[in-house]
Every structure is written in structure tokens, then in C-alpha cells.
Image (cartoon, rainbow, N blue to C red):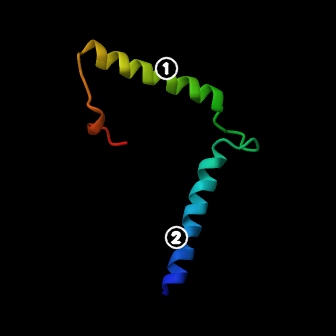
């Protein structure tokens, strides 16, 4: 397999992965994820985790974060 073909196959895999992710939210998907509901759920979860860390005096240094 040439490098060009390998790059095309990798790009195709990336595109197919993104299509699958977007389908979760697509209006034609009868089982789609409601973006507003999911956003609210994630905000609540983030606040809950933040509160847990605060209540347990757990400090995470910014340079320790994986992102």
C-alpha cells in the first residue's frame, strides 16, 4: 500500500467516524440526542464533580489535567 493510499484510507476512516458522531444528533435520526438536554445534563454533572472536589478539599493543579 502506498503512502497516498494509506492517507486516503485514514481520511476515509476519519470521515466515517465523524459521520457516525454527527448521526447521533441528526434530525433524521429517530433516536437522536437532544443537544439542549445533553448540554444541561453535562453542566449539572460538571457542577456536581466540582462540588465534590471542593467539599473533599481536593485540589487539582492545572498542569496535572490531561487537557
- In what quadrant of the picture does the C terminus appear? top left
The answer to which of marks 1 and 2 sits earlier in the sequence is 2
Extreme-bottom residue of the structure: 2
The numbered disc on residue 6 is none
Q: Residue furthest top?
A: 55
* Drawn side of residue 17 relative to residue 66, left or right: right
**1 and 2 marks in contact (CB < 8 Å):** no
Q: Which residue is labeled 2 in the image? A: 10
Q: Position of residue 53 (x, y in %)?
A: 30, 20
Q: Position of residue 7 (x, y in %)?
A: 52, 75
User: How many C-alpha atoms fall within 10 Å of the one at disc 2: few (<14), some, or many (≥20)?
Assistant: few
Residue 40 lies in what quarter of the image?
Answer: top right
From what the image shows, is residue 5 above or below residue 39?
below
Residue 42 placement, left or right of 53: right
Q: Which residue is mark 1?
A: 44
**Mark 2 falls on what kind of element?**
helix
Amino acid at each position: 500500500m502506498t503512502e497516498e493510499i494509506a492517507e486516503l484510507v485514514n481520511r476515509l476512516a476519519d470521515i466515517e467516524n465523524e459521520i457516525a458522531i454527527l448521526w447521533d444528533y441528526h434530525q433524521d435520526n429517530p433516536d437522536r440526542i437532544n443537544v439542549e438536554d445533553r448540554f444541561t445534563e453535562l453542566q449539572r454533572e460538571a457542577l456536581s464533580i466540582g462540588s465534590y472536589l471542593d467539599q473533599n478539599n481536593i485540589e487539582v493543579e492545572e498542569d496535572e489535567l490531561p487537557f
